[in-house]
Image: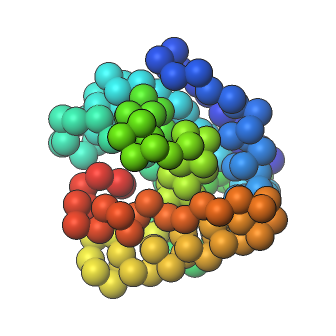
Amino acid sequence: MGVVLRNLQKVVPLRRARLRKDVNTLRHILGIQKFDLGIICVDNRRIQQINNTYRKKNAPTDVLSFPFYEDLRPGKLPCNLHRDDLNLGDIFLGVEFLMEQCQDDSLDLHGVLTVVTTHGICHLLGYRHETEEEWTEMLQKESYILSEYNRLTGQSLEPLTKRCSQDRSRTK
């Protein structure tokens, strides 16, 4: 099983091989290598259209996740599946939006893509942040994943989630 990585935007130069490697490392950490996963990189116009259609928010955003299993409980994986059901879903990355945030905050785009992809994968795995309790649970999961990622890669990434805890509409 694998990762389908599509770059549908032309605004920001993107190193897909690095992102694919990072996503595969995240999949290894989570033990979800047997599941398919879609990562679609889009510009502000497209992520805004998707955000407006599915969340009724007419603004660009950093990440939108569309889980294959909508009722998955956090920390649980789908089981007893046929080969065709080994799909976690799709993650849309607002690459142009993220680049603007990186420029504003002097952050590395590829590191931020990995962090935001981690957030998206957590959503595919049933994590939400509609309540304070869910927010805490998701932040703990993201922190764990990124600490393992850092241990394996020598990076020093941390969740962006805690930086936007006052504005929960930013990441979904």
Q: Whole-percent x and y of residue 94?
A: 43, 35
- Reply above or below: 151 against 116: below
The residue under the point 45% across, 49% down is: 65
Q: Residue furthest front?
A: 106
- Reply above or below: 144 against 146: below
Q: Whole-percent x and y of residue 118?
A: 57, 58
Report the number of numbered marks. Answer: 0
Q: Whole-percent x and y of residue 72?
A: 50, 69
Q: Quadrant of residue 21?
A: top right
The residue under the point 81% across, 65% down is: 152
Q: Quick check: can you spot residue 81? A: no
Q: Residue furthest top?
A: 10
Q: Residue furthest bottom?
A: 133
Q: Whole-percent x and y of residue 163?
A: 35, 64
**2 left or right of 90?**
right
Q: Quadrant of residue 40?
A: top right
Image quadrant containing the C terminus: bottom left
| Residue nearest the viewer, comparing 37 with 138 | 138
The residue under the point 61% across, 76% down is: 144
Colour scheme of the picture:
rainbow
- Reply above or below: 155 against 97: below
| Residue nearest the viewer, comparing 108 with 166 | 108
| Residue nearest the viewer, comparing 127 with 12 | 12
Q: Quick check: can you spot residue 138? A: yes
**67 left or right of 24?**
left
Q: Quadrant of residue 132?
A: bottom left
The residue under the point 26% across, 62% down is: 168
